């Protein structure tokens, strides 16, 4: 996906951690570090957006895909 190209390394790392956490949760098990992964990725998306490393369009794409957020919620 073009909206995931050129992401800062720290954001790529947070995405990988969130994906690993979702894999555990989606398998029906409990990941006791899920909230940490979620909060770190959310903070990194916000930092990258406010630091103009990614666009607002990219930020919302990442929030919807990896944090499973919906706009307006």
Image (cartoon, grey):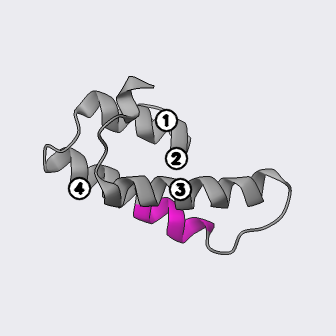
User: What residue is disc 4 on?
Assistant: 47
The answer to whether mark 2 and mark 4 are in CB contact below 8 A is no
Residue 64 has which mark?
Answer: 1
Q: CA distance from mark 2 to mark 4?
A: 15 Å
Magenta residue span = 34-40
Closest to the observer, 14 or 32:
14
The answer to whether residue 42 shows anywhere in this view is yes
User: What residue is disc 2 on?
Assistant: 67
> In the rendered view, does 54 fall on the left or right side of 22?
left
Return the disc, 4 or 3, that comes first in the chain's sequence.
Answer: 3
Q: CA distance from mark 4 to mark 3?
A: 17 Å
User: Measured from the top left, where is residue 36 in percent x and y?
Assistant: 52, 71
For label 4, the crowd category at 10 Å Cα-Cα, with few meaning under 14, some 14 to 19 and many 20 or more, is some
For label 2, the crowd category at 10 Å Cα-Cα, with few meaning under 14, some 14 to 19 and many 20 or more, is some
Return the disc, 3 or 2, that comes first in the chain's sequence.
Answer: 3
Mark 3 or 2: the one toward you = 3
Q: Secondary structure at mark 2?
A: helix
User: What residue is disc 3 on?
Assistant: 16
Q: Secondary structure at mark 3?
A: helix
The residue at the point 65 percent across, 61 percent down is 21
Q: CA distance from mark 3 to mark 2?
A: 12 Å
Return the disc, 2 or 4, that comes first in the chain's sequence.
Answer: 4
Q: CA distance from mark 1 to mark 3?
A: 15 Å
The answer to whether residue 72 shows anywhere in this view is no
């Amino acid at each position: 996906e073009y909206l995931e190209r050129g992401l800062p390394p720290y954001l790529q790392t947070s995405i990988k951690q969130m994906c690993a956490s979702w894999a555990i949760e989606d398998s029906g098990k409990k990941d006791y570090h899920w909230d940490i992964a979620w909060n770190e990725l959310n903070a990194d998306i916000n930092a990258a957006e406010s630091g103009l490393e990614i666009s607002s369009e990219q930020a919302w794409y990442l929030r919807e895909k990896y944090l499973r957020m919906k706009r307006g919620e």
